[in-house]
Amino acid sequence: MTAPTDHPEPVTSTEPVAHTESVNMMDHLGFSSGQGLQFGMYSLGDHLPNPADGSRVSAGERIREFIGYAQAAEDAGLDFISVGESHQQYFASQAHAVILGAIAQATSTIRIGSTSTILSTSDPVRVFENFSTIDHISGGRAELVAGRASRVGLFELLGYDLRDYEELFEEKFELLNRINREQKLSWRGQFRAPLNDAEVLPRPAQEPLPIWRAVGGAPTSAIKAGLAGVPMVMAHLGGTTSSFKPTVNAYREAARHQGFDPAALPIATAGFFHAAETSQEALRGLYPHINEGMKRTNGQGMPKQLFAQAVDPHSIVNLGSPQQIVEKMLHQHEVFGHQRYLGQMDFGGMPYDQVMKQIEIIGSEIIPALKKYTASPTPASALSASAANRHAAEEPAR
Amino acid sequence: MKLVAISGSNVGTKTRTVMEHVTQTVIVQDPDVEATLVDLAEVDMVFSDGRNFTEYTGDTGRVTRALMDADAIIIGTPIFQASIPATLKNIFDLLPVNAFRDKVVAMVATAGSAKHYLIPQQQLQPILTYMKAQVVQPYVFVEEKDLLRKQIVNTDVIARLDRLVEDTLVLTQTYASIREAKDAAYGF
């Protein structure tokens, strides 16, 4: 979809590439083309019972559901689909790269990613090989979102020391980005064997492979993403949209501080999504899945009082009628100026047909409205274009 | 209703003696309450390393889960160096930030000196409120002179503990019924 027209020359230096030579990720991912806010769908890969009757599909069925989501999302016109890596109980996407390979084969236009790849407990060389391969199977549609894991059971399972939590990620993320930029590299670090003039193959179809950093709501890891000059995916469970603006500001400020152009760095937001005829129905449809699912995966549910606030127009949670969701998303877009939203709509044993219904509503009612308000007729700088366009358009009622 | 009583020290007998009495009092006042006493001197707890409480194993996993499943918690603490002991602080560090949401938590302190009377209020209560507990406002302060050979010998202390247990049970039931009514009103 966004195969770059002018590839940079392959870099053979073992030194980090100077920022001026780095690829403009906004152009590279096609966000500068005036297409407006992208809509994606993500799954953590959870495999939880449906709270309505306690039933749970088999792991095999759950894995095939992810592939089904991708096909339906592509048909409905969604821009992106992703599955996360998790190694704990109640998850089915331990081998998320394998699932993404199947999705790559089963689809033809939708972009494919990971939310997230737990880089801390993997070898960046193997991760790059996997995603490069997915990139080729998909014809240049692969993206990688690297995260640090919110649960730590996998450290024990995969033989890592939790005391290295921070450094494991930072070292591996830096190496992954260098592998992505440099055809051949020499590298030395704490957590894997040194690389001596090593060539990590296959080189991806997209040069470079789009690599994002997963960021929680707090500014600290957003700052790290900004300092590294990589795009960020900012995930949230709930709260007021404006309360996450400082995170976005910190990201852009950190990038600028380090000599990167924030206007060249895309931002995606990610969170719960559920559309129904009315906001009350949406609350009713989603709450048991979130509450029971979180109890199983986090040990604590979500209080109704907190969840009820998700219907507020200023809430970051995209829950309500399609019209209410469109208005919320436009508000979020105005506040953040982000390029892509990722909706999580399958959490907590949501039945397959209900997820399909969500995808259908997104395609038929939500995406057309979003594009109408955020797409600009002529390509322009993505940071300002969509906002300027929307200001010119009629202000949505709220 | 599930209630967990904690004896917060890994040494000495005073806090343990008082908390045994507290646990018995709970059972006498309401036999339907599932009351458990956790004596930190008898369990093998690891220090918190920041992981989610569900991911600890052994005694650490059992104790954190018991606390997270409790509706009410009565914390017994000695006073060490004008504060709570490290063993008790570690319990808080092992739990999530909102661990005491929808829970009623009461405090009992044992101390060698009356000069420590405000320590529970100044050192323990801020942690409990930070962790979203509904704290029972009065607390019971027990001095060394109130105890003799693992028995409470001051009947006034027994009376105060009786009232604290009653307040804890009543508040737990009250908050639970308020919450049930409120949750039902949301209609989802």
Image (cartoon, coloured by chain):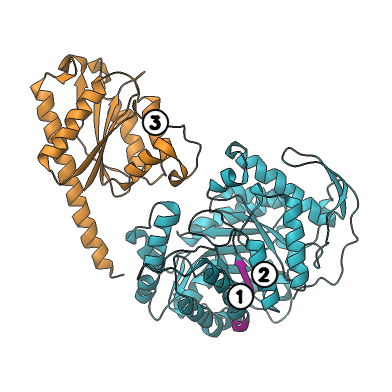
- Which residue of the protein is positioned furthest toward the bottom in this rendering? A364
What distance separates the C-alpha of mark 1 from that of mark 3? 47 Å
Q: In the picture provided, is B162 more to the left or to the right than A109?
A: left
Q: In the picture provided, is A148 more to the left or to the right than B120?
A: right
What stretch of residues is rendered in magenta? A75-82
Give me the residue at 24% from left, 67% from top: B185
Per the image, the residue denoted by label 2 is A112
What distance separates the C-alpha of mark 2 from that of mark 3? 45 Å
Local SS, label 3: helix
Is the residue B122 above or below the residue A99 in the image? above
The chain letter corresponding to cyan is A
Per the image, the residue denoted by label 1 is A70
Q: Chain of mark 1?
A: A
Q: Residue B89, labelled with which disc?
A: 3
Is the residue A390 above or below the residue A314 in the image? below
Q: Chain of mark 3?
A: B
Identity of the amino acid at label 2?
Ile
Whether residue A259 is visible to the viewer of this picture, yes or no, is: no
Q: Colour of chain B?
A: orange
Tags 2 and 1 touching, CB below 8 Å: yes
Identity of the amino acid at label 3?
Lys
Q: Residue A125, labelled with which disc?
A: none
